[in-house]
Image: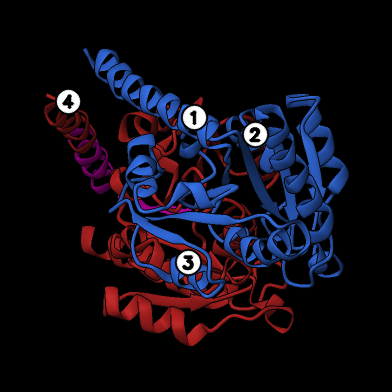
Chain colours: A blue, B red
Amino acid sequence: MEVKIVKNILGDNNRIAAEINDLFTRKTITCMNIMSGPGAGKTTILEKTIPILEKKHGVRTAVIEGDIEGDDDGARLDRLQVPVVQLNTRGACHLSAPMVKSGLEEFDLDGLDFIVVENVGNLVCPAGFDLGEDFKVTVVSLPEGDDKPSKYPGMFLKSTVVLINKIDLAPHLEFSKDRVYTDCRRLKPDLKILELSARTGEGIDAWCDYLAGRIKEKQQKQQ
Amino acid sequence: MEVKIVKNILGDNNRIAAEINDLFTRKTITCMNIMSGPGAGKTTILEKTIPILEKKHGVRTAVIEGDIEGDDDGARLDRLQVPVVQLNTRGACHLSAPMVKSGLEEFDLDGLDFIVVENVGNLVCPAGFDLGEDFKVTVVSLPEGDDKPSKYPGMFLKSTVVLINKIDLAPHLEFSKDRVYTDCRRLKPDLKILELSARTGEGIDAWCDYLAGRIKEKQQKQQ
């Protein structure tokens, strides 16, 4: 009985995620679901990424911001002058496709190239829920330690890209990048890994180039 | 239907948590459930805390170590020569009372004063599951940012103590301790807040004094 209920919930989620994905195909929008534990730097990465995508690559971005409570992150991104919808899960530990669908209703999709869904800070649960995105990104940060891929494999297995953030703190921490690379590649050999510091800006250009490439690739496929 | 199922699961959890709590009362054991997001430093704090509790306060400790996968943390604590049980949740995002109950079967409870349950790294889900503990502790660390109490209130509301860890990194980060104190006190005025660095050892003695006080208090009540 329990299992049946869980399957129904996931079935609904997957059905709506597929609808969202179809919508993004029709509208030629690329969607990224960005996930991490609390405080790994998702919002700061977006604060640095979105203006470069706009100025250097002409990419028009909107953000769906997922938090349990409050609008701290939504307010931060709103300052970038891009469309932002703040979703509050009211205690739930991840975003679901129905939540994303309701958020999308707030946007004029015809004016967008790229939608970022910033998930709830949680290195476990968001991995289980597809949101209609084109790809998932997991952020880990140096202060969290180098054991995260081996301890939280689900998140990394579901991701296309891993960002190693806060590399500016390397002189003050013990952190083996080698271990992260080895553990990630053991889980998923083709996992793309990029290192950056959202605070200093190091590595952000390469990350934006990667995103712009994916967005362009989808646009060219549609033509 | 869904709600009923969830209630049954929580009902079972709470019934077993109450049984565990009774057992701890009969055995005069104090139990702490320590929680945080991934990489806030729970295990490192325990590595520093347990030897001081033993040497300075004569406290005999055992640890139930909760992780999704692997035994990294269990192996680290095993080096302290205290009884350690490693629980793997196999994907589940928190420990439950039945899991803790099965872990307790591995210990000789008559030789123990203090049991630490180190929860899965997750700042959301563990808050919803009592494990029979005497009190809950939430760890936040400076690199995670000062917005955690306002963004993840559930965890802080359920806790008796908040540890602010990695204070040695303060010179390299922007972090408002004032904001953490204000947000915590707004959520729960009597929340005890301690600052420490598990790496440098700063603040660890005061934290151990607090724990030893709680353990002694329970022992005196039982006499």
For the residues bearing labels 3 and 2, Cβ distance under 8 angstroms: no
- The three-letter code of the residue at mark 3 reads Asp
* Bounds of the magenta segment: B15-36
Q: Is residue B223 visible?
A: no
> Circle 2: is it few (<14), some (14-19), or many (20+) Cα within 10 Å?
many
Residue positioned 84% across, 34% down in the render: A182
Instruction: Name the chain letter of the residue that bears numbered label 4.
Output: B
Q: Which residue is mark 1?
A: A21
Label drawn at residue B5: 4
Mark 2 — residue? A159
Q: How many marks?
A: 4
Cα separation between marks 4 and 2: 31 Å
Q: Residue A120 colored magenta?
A: no
Above/below status of A103 relative to B214: above
Q: How far across and down, in percent of the image, does residue A167 sit?
A: 81, 62
Classify the position of the C terminus of chain A by image quarter. Answer: top right
Q: Nearer the viewer, residue B18 or A157?
A: A157
* Residue for badge 3: A73
